[in-house]
Image (cartoon, rainbow, N blue to C red):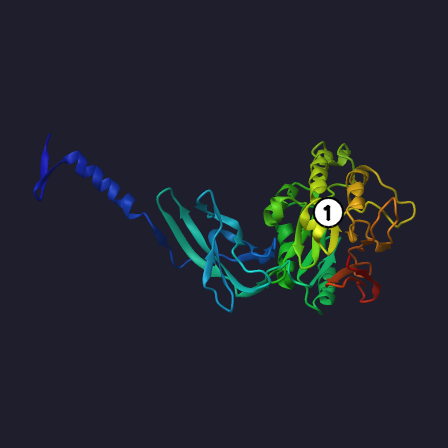
């Protein structure tokens, strides 16, 4: 075998050739950047989700695959950085980004800014990065159970009516709020990503969701369409389900997912719905939830459902999914000493006083998608009272009520 000399060492020719092949591979390890490219663009966001005392989720969508991070901090600084990591791998080569900020302090203002760097080529031993896009700084405040006050507003059944959303937010922003709830049917159905971006994510980002968390309650229309199974990718909720609970100030919130309003066997669903069994699991969760210390010790208990278990409209009965919700959830809520149930779905505003033996709690039902029929439900809670104000789309106050602390 022919040998060649290299200094004092003698190497086989085959080994030298193999090293020459490997050198370019090892030289590529580590970040590389490709300049002169069109930067990625933000399609939606950043918008806030799943607020907590010590945490907040920031979500956004880019038009190109990127790797993403959030710079954040208190006192006007952006001195910390967070990325999304799953099983030891930092999320990368994706357009949808959800980064959870943790280790925050309760009731504290924070500033943040998102950053996304395009991934041009993602090889097994080499990644080539492109240009970067960042957002302007925004701010939020963490929740606190120790706070004496919390304010929130509720919109429902917008059905992609962006003008109604803008008008209602105009009423809401007159006084600061800590949370914004969308109580179902914000969308007509779900056909594709563009629909979610255009009629939900972009509007809420522009109006409030960069600084005020959006709390999403799924409606029956959001269970429909080929893209309905991907809606939760754009959301973040406590526990990862459409039904969940959390605390803010003196209020304990419970969000229920009522699913479809028809029976699973209805021909419109082509045999692809299984909400009866889903609600069985939700019922078991609710049974434990109303026994929890957080629920029982709260000064106020507010529950959200899209489909109401009771209707103030004459001749409107229950059937299908609505009846299933009534049978599975109402007995538990009646025993739980709920302060207020907030519902939607019928497109008609209604206020129902407690009716012992049927619903032992008051219920307010929001209006519909048109501006003249829409409602903004607002609640302001403190140590003494939970104050309800319902404003119609034309600015007329329909109802006000105080619920004293128990």
Q: Is residue 241 left or right of residue 264?
A: left
Residue 400 is situated, as x and y percent measured from the top left of the image, at: 83, 63
| Side of 14 relative to 261 (left or right) | left
User: Which image quadrant for residue 300?
Assistant: bottom right
| 284 left or right, relative to 398 | left
Residue 137 vs 406, above or below: the answer is below
Identify which residue, 296 or 222, lies in the foreground. 296
Q: In the rendering, at what x and y percent does residue 273 appear? A: 71, 35
> Observer-nearest residue: 127 or 239?
239
* Quarter that holds the N terminus: top left
Q: Is residue 303 above or below residue 271?
A: below
Check the picture and name the quadrant holding the C terminus. Answer: bottom right
Which residue in the rendered view is the most extreme toward the right? 314
- What residue appears at the point 31 percent right and 48 percent down from the top-left corner? 28
Q: What is the x, y in percent for residue 29?
A: 32, 47
What residue would you read off at disc 1? 219
**Residue at (21%, 41%) from the top-left corner?**
20
User: Along the horizontal axis of the image, is 382 left or right of 399?
Assistant: left
Is residue 100 or residue 234 the one in the foreground?
100
Q: How many marks?
A: 1
Residue 38 showing in the rendered view: no
Mark 1 nearby-residue class (10 Å; few <14, some 14–19, many ≥20): many
Horizontal and vertical percent position of residue 326: 81, 41
Work out whether residue 261 or residue 336 is closer to the camera in this orientation and state it.
336
Label 1 secondary element: loop
Q: Is residue 76 visible?
A: yes
């Amino acid at each position: 075998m022919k040998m060649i000399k290299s200094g004092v060492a003698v190497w086989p020719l085959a080994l030298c050739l193999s090293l020459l092949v490997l050198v370019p591979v090892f030289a590529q390890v580590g970040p590389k950047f490709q300049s002169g490219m069109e930067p990625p663009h933000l399609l939606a966001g950043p918008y806030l989700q799943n607020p907590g005392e010590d945490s907040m989720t920031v979500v956004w969508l880019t038009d190109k695959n990127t790797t993403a991070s959030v710079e954040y901090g208190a006192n006007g600084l952006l001195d910390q950085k967070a990325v999304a990591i799953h099983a030891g791998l930092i999320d990368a080569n994706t357009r949808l980004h959800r980064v959870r900020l943790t280790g925050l302090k309760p009731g504290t203002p924070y500033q943040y800014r998102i950053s996304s760097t395009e991934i041009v080529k993602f090889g097994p031993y080499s990644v080539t990065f492109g240009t970067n896009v960042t957002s302007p700084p925004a701010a939020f405040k963490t929740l606190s159970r120790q706070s004496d006050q919390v304010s929130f507003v509720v919109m429902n059944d917008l059905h992609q009516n962006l003008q109604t959303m803008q008008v209602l937010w105009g009423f809401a922003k007159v006084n600061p709020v800590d949370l914004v709830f969308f109580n179902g049917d914000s969308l007509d159905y779900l056909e594709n990503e563009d629909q979610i971006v255009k009629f939900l994510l972009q509007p809420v980002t522009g109006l409030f969701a960069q600084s005020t968390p959006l709390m999403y309650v799924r409606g029956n229309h959001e269970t429909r369409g080929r893209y309905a199974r991907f809606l939760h990718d754009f959301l973040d909720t406590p526990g990862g389900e459409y039904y969940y609970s959390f605390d803010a100030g003196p209020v304990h919130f419970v969000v229920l997912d009522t699913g479809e309003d028809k029976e699973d066997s209805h021909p419109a669903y082509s045999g692809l719905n299984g909400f009866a069994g889903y609600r069985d699991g939700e019922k078991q969760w609710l049974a434990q939830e109303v026994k929890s210390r957080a629920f029982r010790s709260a000064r106020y208990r507010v529950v959200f459902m899209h489909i109401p278990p009771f209707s103030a409209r004459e001749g409107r009965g229950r059937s299908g999914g609505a009846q299933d919700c009534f049978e599975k959830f109402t007995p538990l809520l009646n025993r739980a000493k709920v302060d207020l149930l907030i519902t939607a779905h019928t497109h008609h505003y209604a206020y129902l006083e407690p009716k012992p033996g049927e619903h032992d709690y008051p219920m307010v039902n929001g209006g519909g998608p048109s501006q003249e029929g829409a409602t903004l439900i607002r609640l302001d809670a403190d140590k003494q009272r939970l104050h309800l104000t319902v404003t119609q789309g034309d600015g007329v106050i329909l109802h006000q009520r105080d619920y004293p602390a128990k």
